[in-house]
Image: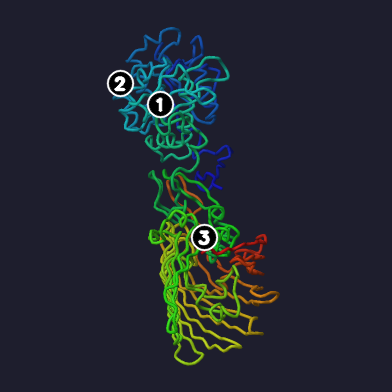
Amino acid sequence: MVTRSFSKLAVILSTAGVLAVPAYSLAQSPITASLDTGVDNDQMTDVRVPGFDFVDNDADTNDRSSNSHGTFQALIYHDHAPTSRYMSIRTYTGNGDSGKMLLSRGQAAVDFALANPAVKVLMINRLQPIDAGRLQTAAKRDVTVLINSGNQGQPNPQGSATLIPQLGGKGLIVAAHTEDGTIWSKSNRPGPAFAEHTITALYNTPRTDVEGTSFALPRVAATAVRLKTLDPHLTPFQIVEIIKRTARDAGAPGVDSVYGYGLLDANAAFQAVGTPVVPDGGGGGGGGGGGSSAGVAVAGALVIGGGLYALIKRNKELKRTLILDDYGRSFIMDMSVATTKRDRTPSLNLVMADLEREDRVMQITDNEEVKSYAVLSTNRDNFRALDDVNDLDFRGTEDVSYSFQSEYSSGRKFGFALNDSQRSAFGAMSLIDEGASKIDFLTTESVTVPFMGFTDQGISSMMQFQPADRINVKVGLSANDDQQQWGLESDSAFFETSYETPRYGLAVQVGELYEDGSLFGGSSSGAFSVDSAKTLSIGLSGRYSLTPETSLIGSYTRGFTDVKHKQPSLLSNFSTIETDSFGAGLISRNLFTRGDAFGVGFFQPLRVTSGEVDTTVPYARDIEGNIYSNSGRYSLVPDGAEHVYELYYSVDLGHKSRLGTHLMYRSEPWSDADAQSESVVMFTLDKAFN
């Protein structure tokens, strides 16, 4: 959720339409000056400021036109900006004398408007002759200039509207559309020459049957003055850009010669535009001079790992975080809503995606000395599109994985993988003889090495030596990179030594993980970014065989992480973070029938057990641009503990087919005590093809 934040400290404006308290009093608020037929003296008395009648050369700007043209125009403005001040300057009668509009009146009217420094929007009838130099002076004095395109149904704007391109992007031509969003038949179009300077708005008013681009004009003026009222630092160029960028596209895609930038969307103009940033500042400075302040980007970057989810839940200040859009406008964002959690626990969607993959096994050598094979895995559609597997290009894509394994009679093993982690070669899973038991758990990280990176994309290798009977030594290396914009890059190294007998096995792991720009799988950019994280982990794994085909397995891993914080970021001064993960299971094969496999397991994914961090959360900005922040130190320990309970059973059906059943129950996901539990029941059918 994003709401508006402005005013001296923390007055909030909801984008749902709650009326805002202006950033300053009515007596100081921006004024829109209109050059037209005047306004009925009984209308808008609460927001009218003194104008002038250049027809009769007096201060009485009462509208005496036959169709109340200027009055209806002003009332439309008042409908859309009811608290904004309005200056009426009468330059013609509206009773058939439009052709007699005098250049001298127009010049004098603009000079009169500019004499009041509070005038920030100038609304001019395109029939009014005006000197381009006068309009350029207005633009230089922080005034947004708006002129209607005209009502002749011409392919180009007429009259003074043609001067708008000379203002350097600080003014707009206003065309008109009907209630169904199509161009009004009598509205002059922008044409190719003026499309970049045109916006289209509604052409009528419910108070009269008179129609025209003159009634589209005040709708745009009301939007412009409200933008200036809420954010006084906005320049005319920025106001024009906001209106254009938030317009609804109409006609041909993009800017076109009929609608220009499209239809005015006054609601969208008050939403954040572009890539919001959390401003970098605490207690003062920054932001007031226009444009977004230095800060850290929000959009697309708030991807967090498990260590930070507890912080977002615990720190209530993050629900009211000040952000700035491309134009330095202040909004309030609930960072918990804006955050994406990077979840490594298997979900139904991830499992189904995995089932869409196909493996091609290639035997390379098979003799008494060495057995080696390679496995190529990708989406089935990739294989179907190939005449030869050698044509498959897996460079730079995460859709293809490749692994190579070699096992020597001396006990040595070697493995290499691209986009396919070697983590299963470590921990409790590595203590199982595939000939004795088959492991089909969906949740495996807790019984392997959870700190071998948080993505499988990248390269990894494993080497095993057997220095003595029943003793194995393994070394694993990985370099992970998921190649995403806010991606994960990490390097890890693991050492494991194990002692194995037919009855039992015991293994100890020691590893180090270096994450570049992320923490526990969090994003490498964004409001919760870090510079780097280094984790030292130790683990203990075991197996106990109840029978030759039934075993108990278990693993426990503990990590100690030192974090280097990054600026700009909301986070700083991390303590050492301690984490743990564990899992245990019973696995068996040939339990009910030959070739079947059964397993039941209990797992706790990686969970923070100790750690703190300082947060500095901006919550408001005053009209001088000073940023106000709340700071505090918060625990990273979650209030719950996620546990995963899993059961599987699979059986051979013959003809190279296998039927499987998986049941998974996840309590307190993300170690959030308030989160709803999740359940997955899945049936799979695997079939091998020659």
Q: Are marks 3 and 2 in contact (CB under 8 Å)?
A: no
- Mark found first going from the N terminus, 3 or 2: 2
Q: Do the residues labelled 1 and 3 touch (CB within 8 Å)?
A: no
In this rendering, the answer to whether 513 lies above or below 232 is: below
Comparing 393 with 8, the one in front is 393
How many angstroms separate mark 3 from mark 2 (CA)?
A: 70 Å
Q: Position of residue 415 (x, y in %)?
A: 43, 75
Residue at disc 3, secondary structure: strand
How many angstroms separate mark 2 from mark 1 (CA)?
A: 14 Å
Q: Which residue is drawn at 54% across and 58% down?
A: 356
Residue at disc 2, secondary structure: loop
Query: Where on the picture, by quarter, is residue 584?
Result: bottom right
Q: Are marks 2 and 1 in contact (CB under 8 Å)?
A: no
Camera sees residue 493: no
Q: Where is residue 130 in the image (x, y as percent from the top left)?
A: 33, 19
Label number found at residue 146: 1
Q: Quick one: which residue is furthest to the top in this view?
A: 96
Label number found at residue 93: none
Q: Position of residue 192 (x, y in %)?
A: 34, 26
Callout 3 crowding tier (Cα within 10 Å): few <14, some 14–19, many ≥20: some
Q: What amino acid is labelled 2 in the image?
A: Asp
In this rendering, the answer to whether 424 lies above or below 306 is: below
Q: Name the residue under label 3.
A: 357
Q: What amino acid is labelled 3 in the image?
A: Arg
Q: Name the residue under label 2.
A: 131
